[in-house]
Amino acid sequence: METPPTRRPTMDDVAARAGVSRALVSIVFRDLPGASGQTRERVRAVAAEIGYRPDHRARLLSRKRTHLLGATFGVGHEFHSDLLSELYAAAAGHGYELVLSGITPGRTESQAVQELLSLRCDAVILLGPTMTAHELADIAAFTPTTVVARAVRATGVDVVRTDDVAGARLATEHLLDLGHRRVVHIDGGRAPGAAERRRGYRLAMRGADLDVSIIPGGLTEDAGADAARRLLSDGSEAPTAAFVFNDASAAGFLHAVRRAGHSVPRELSVVGYDDSRLARSVWADLTTVAQNAPLLSESAAELAIARLGGEPSGAQMLIAPRLVVRSTTSQPRL
Amino acid sequence: METPPTRRPTMDDVAARAGVSRALVSIVFRDLPGASGQTRERVRAVAAEIGYRPDHRARLLSRKRTHLLGATFGVGHEFHSDLLSELYAAAAGHGYELVLSGITPGRTESQAVQELLSLRCDAVILLGPTMTAHELADIAAFTPTTVVARAVRATGVDVVRTDDVAGARLATEHLLDLGHRRVVHIDGGRAPGAAERRRGYRLAMRGADLDVSIIPGGLTEDAGADAARRLLSDGSEAPTAAFVFNDASAAGFLHAVRRAGHSVPRELSVVGYDDSRLARSVWADLTTVAQNAPLLSESAAELAIARLGGEPSGAQMLIAPRLVVRSTTSQPRL
DNA sequence: TTGAAAGCGCTAACAG
DNA sequence: CTGTTAGCGCTTTCAA
């Protein structure tokens, strides 16, 4: 076993040892034309021998374009993780590298973005940012900026997001198609996407000439459970189906409903939103609406890169979601 | 609104405009002694005015130590997310910066590590790596390496992990303390940690002079459900409690048991492992064993940094887990 | 094909 | 307190 060298080998070391110039080594490592096959092999062999790896920092510094795509994401946010996986693939597919910057309770969105900017990322992709349109515009003034999964209009920023109106329609119309007539919506209050989902629900109900009934909800299991309790103790005519803002809330809702002795889907059908791990669990096995993570990511990467190519900004791209039918929906009991 | 400049301002621009030397600007931005309060203010003001931000790449390149801590993690891995949050805090607390490198289906562990190495991170922290001890040793030969949440012995690498033997004992003894005597363990096969958990279970049972009964399981809900079905259809005397390898498997187990008409915890107590989101859901509300993510992360960061200070490698640090009692365990029915 | 020279934007070590 | 002088390890001309 080799003893660790005091200094990591540099391109010069490789060049010297291989008996060529440093520029040549650079060419070989970037797979550019300008070196004979023989030379290439020799250079690579020498590099491997002395354990040389190109220094990323130096490379970035000397290039005009860094070919770095920066992405901020919520650490622990399930959906962001899905997006990141695809983003890695999309970036690589376009010859870019992805640099991550996580947002945690102790690390603000702004800090996360600043890190990416000081690395001189060519463009930044922000997953579900919560900052103001103004702050976003400030960032976009210096760096091509693409926002994913949030509806905003800010000068200079591109937006890619799921068509939540369509998603809510999909969910609601699924219930209507099954024959339900009294369908309620447990909403997400002021959460991002909540307004769109209410709208989609309303459109579907009105389209079928049915009464709209929106119950205040939230994003958590507790919120869903609360809504269920209120709904069940309500004197009015009981609904036969509910479309809930997201999976977490739907899970709480589901649990409370079953707890109260009602059978799902026999007495009440339930649809969630997000297709999260929870929705897929054997217990919930929830009918839900899935966002198209691969397409969202691919589109975001493409938009960002297009901007680098001089494309004008301001795109607002809507991606269609799809319905995932599981076991919490069925025809209403006669 | 200002038009975006063609070229980002550099330290020289700030220096020129503030009428000072570049070195001074550098001092101001690094908060080093050697500049008057007045000068500091003026420099900062000018910098803000022309929109200057220090260039990270250049900074890294010129420093001997990069003060970068690299971390690889499984994108979408819930527990890794917990660790990352804490790692960000721990790194910042020690004056280091954290660089993330994600592992996805399309991006191997090795690629992820290589990226960190080519950024010249001072040290790398690998969350639950699956590579061989040999591969780990190869990395550690060049860069201080700390492995988190996996039991390995590789020359040059430090390891921080949860004491799974203790965790399994905790879980089993909780059941014994409640008065259970027929306690089975649904194991995790060859998964990391499975051997330790079997061992902890065995120790606890033998310590109480009880019969050991280990049922082959796995890591998924399906595996847990399968194990439950096998257990229930088994002719032998039914157990009153089960300690399951992890929360996912426990959830599947739980569901299958209830499906079969048995009441949890009245007829059968269940304990999981991990304290995942699933365990906390209103539905499962699973008694489980929680790893100490903050301490794991803090320890990993400290070990890594200690190594940079010349500390010898090879530490094997065990962190104590803790029991989280929820609603799936109770005294056995009389 | 190859080599020499000039940066990229910063930090570091000294001399004023 | 301030300025000068070297690099850090690579890419990028431009000539040979």
Image (tube, coloured by chain):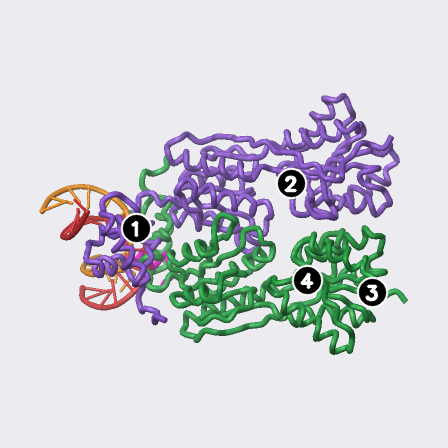
Chain colours: A purple, B green, C red, D orange
- Which of the two labelled residues, at mark 1 and mark 2, occupies the earlier sequence position? 1
Helix or strand or loop: what does disc 4 sit on? Answer: loop
Relative image position of residue B208 (x, y in whole percent): 77, 77
Q: Nearer the viewer, mark 2 or mark 3?
A: 3
Q: CA distance from mark 4 to mark 2?
A: 28 Å
Residue occupying the point 66% across, 72% down:
B199
Residue occupying the point 29% across, 55% down:
A44
The disc label shown at residue B21, or none: none
Give the residues in magenta: B20-32
- Which of the two labelled residues, at mark 4 and mark 3, occupies the earlier sequence position? 3
Check disc 1 and report the residue beneath it.
A29
Res B14 seen here: no
Front residue of A18/B171: it is: A18
Amino acid carrying label 4: it is Phe
Give the vertical position of C1 relative to A170 (above or below).
below
Helix or strand or loop: what does disc 3 sit on? Answer: loop
Relative image position of residue B9 (x, y in whole percent): 32, 45
Amino acid carrying label 1: it is Phe
Helix or strand or loop: what does disc 1 sit on? Answer: helix
Q: Residue furthest front?
A: B235
Q: CA distance from mark 2 to mark 3?
A: 43 Å
Give the vertical position of A226 relative to A19 (above or below).
above
Check disc 3 and report the residue beneath it.
B236
- The answer to which image quadrant residue B333 occupies is bottom right
- Report in which chain the residue with disc 4 lies: B
The disc label shown at residue B245, or none: 4
Q: CA distance from mark 4 to mark 3?
A: 22 Å
What crowding class fits label 4: few (fewer than 14 Cα within 10 Å), some (14-19), or many (20 or more)?
Answer: many
The disc label shown at residue A274, or none: 2
- Report in which chain the residue with disc 1 lies: A
In contact (CB < 8 Å): disc 1 and disc 3: no
What crowding class fits label 1: few (fewer than 14 Cα within 10 Å), some (14-19), or many (20 or more)?
Answer: some
